[in-house]
Image (tube, rainbow, N blue to C red):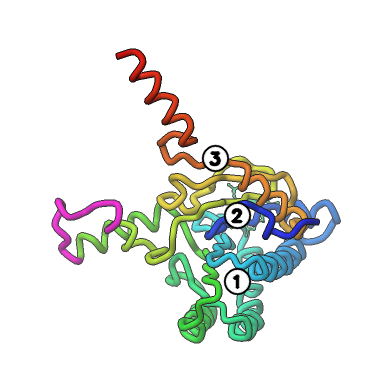
Amino acid sequence: MATPANLRQLPKHIAIIMDGNGRWAKQRRLPRLAGHRQGAAAAQHVVETLLEYKIPYVTLYAFSTENWNRPRVEVDGLFRLLEERLDEGIKYAQEKQIKVHHLGKLDGLPPRLQDKVKRAVELTQNYNRMTLSLAFNYGGRDEIVEAIRCLIRDGVPAQEIDGTIVSRYLYTAGIPDPDLLIRTGGEIRLSNFLTWQSAYTEIYFTPVLWPDFDKKELYKALIAYCERQRRFGGLAQEQDIISDTKQARQKR
Ligand code: IPE
Ligand code: IPE
Ligand code: MG
């Protein structure tokens, strides 16, 4: 397998909707929580690989504001799992100089989990090898509503509000918009993830279930990204612009 150094332009920010844990468990007649455990291990491997590839921003969607609609036992299990992973994760982040960031609301989460998230963020705030954002109790719409509330609270005059200011009021303030968003598990939707930030993000959907998303699958996503042409509403190639200008001149 070639190394990503061969790839043209790697994304600076990769965001992932880690979906398919439940189905992975079901296929094996295991409880859903076993799927989440395996999913957490997959997340660890993906972060290790992205660190090797020197990707500076990684965002993982781990629990949405809508995931509260799941049975209490699953929700509690996910909270416990995150707590456990944070204990391990803080050590790993310190060793690898990863800055941990949280996207979402702490309110409503069990107090012990809140403390652990705050601790992870505090203890790693000065690292800069990678910013790892954990979207936990996160909802894109909630994030925008919260930003509007804060803009009003701060008395920002209506005529001063623009995209840059709104971005500064989001959980992702200071983090560039994702270049690549990967969703595993086969669903073709964003499920309230990075609603504002993904306006021009390249999206890669794969049927692979999250616990099976390994280095090879990640590499496929990176290749697909490198083959895309990002236009941001403009034209693809300098060549298109030149030939169009020539044609226009000839018509005159
Ligand atoms: C994603 O896997 C993890 C969370 C939403 C917490 P799912 O639990 O949604 O897995 P499926 O979609 O049921 O297979
Ligand atoms: C999205 O997956 C949320 C996370 C991966 C954390 P879901 O499984 O909750 O999404 P839907 O319900 O299929 O849209
Ligand atoms: Mg799902």
Q: What kind of element bears circle 2? A: strand
Q: Of marks 1 and 3, which one's residue comes earlier in the chain?
A: 1
- Residue 135, how many percent across, how many down? 52, 64
Front label number (1 vs 3): 3
The residue that disc 3 covers is 229
Eyeballing the image, is 200 above or below 54? Answer: above
| Three-letter amino acid code of the residue under disc 3 | Gln
- Judge depth for marks 2 and 1 and give the one in front: 2
- Magenta range is 154-165
Give the residue furthest to the right: 28
Q: Is 202 in front, or is 159?
A: 202
Crowd around label 1: few <14 · some 14–19 · many ≥20 (10 Å) = some
Nearest the camera: 248 or 175?
248
Q: Separation of disc 1 and disc 3 at Cα?
A: 39 Å
Q: Of the numbered discs in the image, which one, if any, rests on residue 17?
A: 2
Q: In which quarter of the image is the N terminus?
A: bottom right
- Mark 2 vs mark 1: which is more N-terminal? 2
Residue 164 located within the stretch drawn in magenta = yes
Considering the numbered disc 1 on the image, is that residue within a helix, a strand or a loop? helix
Q: Is mark 2 within 8 Å of ligand 2?
A: yes
What amino acid does circle 1 point to?
Answer: Phe
The label shown at residue 79 is 1
| Residue 176 point in image, percent of width and height | 44, 60
